[in-house]
Image (cartoon, coloured by chain):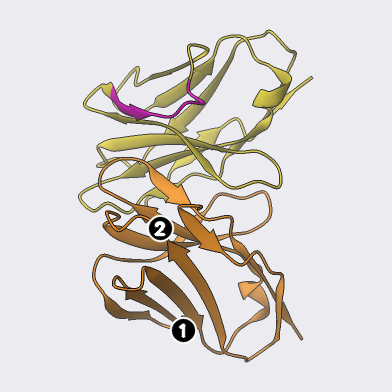
Chain colours: A yellow, B orange
Amino acid sequence: EPEVTQTPSHQVTQMGQEVILRCVPISNHLYFYWYRQILGQKVEFLVSFYNNEISEKSEIFDDQFSVERPDGSNFTLKIRSTKLEDSAMYFCASSGEGYEQYFGPGTRLTVT
Amino acid sequence: QKEVEQDPGPLSVPEGAIVSLNCTYSNSAFQYFMWYRQYSRKGPELLMYTYSSGNKEDGRFTAQLNRASQYISLLIRDSKLSDSATYLCVVGGGYQKVTFGTGTKLQVIP
């Protein structure tokens, strides 16, 4: 069964460093998303992406964040200068013809 | 008022029990409704989705949507130890963001 994959599973970085989180969505899906979940809190929407451009973004998704689909399979989230409060689980999701979204296993980002 | 509300639990039930998990939403514009299961430190796993009022059944799971009352439920029959997880009520309006509830933690005990 097709699934969304994410790498790395855990990333530790120092405050102020840039990180890139990678995702491989389900192959025939066209809509891609990033969400985050701070420990003990609910899952929060960051950004949606379609046809090589951002279609919607939340207040959390400020100038420090960017997304890219560098090739036909990968979808990345870049955080330019990480802050302590960026520590969270980051989930990539994708959807195809239906609205339902399929999530990856997540990348745990720890900023020290 | 929160967009999506769930009782956080934890809800403890014995193995084999029937469990009903409930969710209400505030925005009548939401078009589709999903239940996800999330194990600790794992990604949300899609269990069921529905677009129309009424019941939708898949194995031991039944999702019920009542648009008039803006209420969604998930019924789990013959609960198993592996059903112990957090159940997330998720609503959406199209090919855009979905909004998560805080989740209900379910514990199935032997």
Q: Compute the Cα span from label 2 to label 1.
A: 28 Å
Using the image, determine if residue B11 lies above or below residue A93.
Answer: below
Label 2 and label 1 in one chain:
yes
Q: Amino acid at mark 1?
A: Arg
Residue A46 lies in the magenta-colored region: no
Residue A4 or residue A98, whichever sits in front: A98
The quadrant holding residue B53 is bottom left
Residue B55 in percent (x, y) is at 31, 81
The quadrant holding residue B82 is bottom right
Residue A14 in percent (x, y) is at 75, 13
Q: Which residues are magenta?
A: A54-61
Residue B88 in percent (x, y) is at 53, 60
* Marking on residue B102: none
Residue that mark 2 sits on: B26
* Marking on residue B60: 1
Using the image, determine if residue A20 lies above or below residue A29.
Answer: above
Q: Residue furthest right?
A: A112
Q: Secondary structure at mark 2?
A: loop
Q: Secondary structure at mark 1?
A: loop
Query: Cβ–Cβ below 8 Å for labels 2 and 1?
Result: no
Using the image, determine if residue A68 lies above or below residue B33.
Answer: above
Residue at the image point whose x is 68% and y is 69% from the top: B9
Residue B76 or residue A72, whichever sits in front: B76
The C terminus of chain B, quarter of image: bottom right
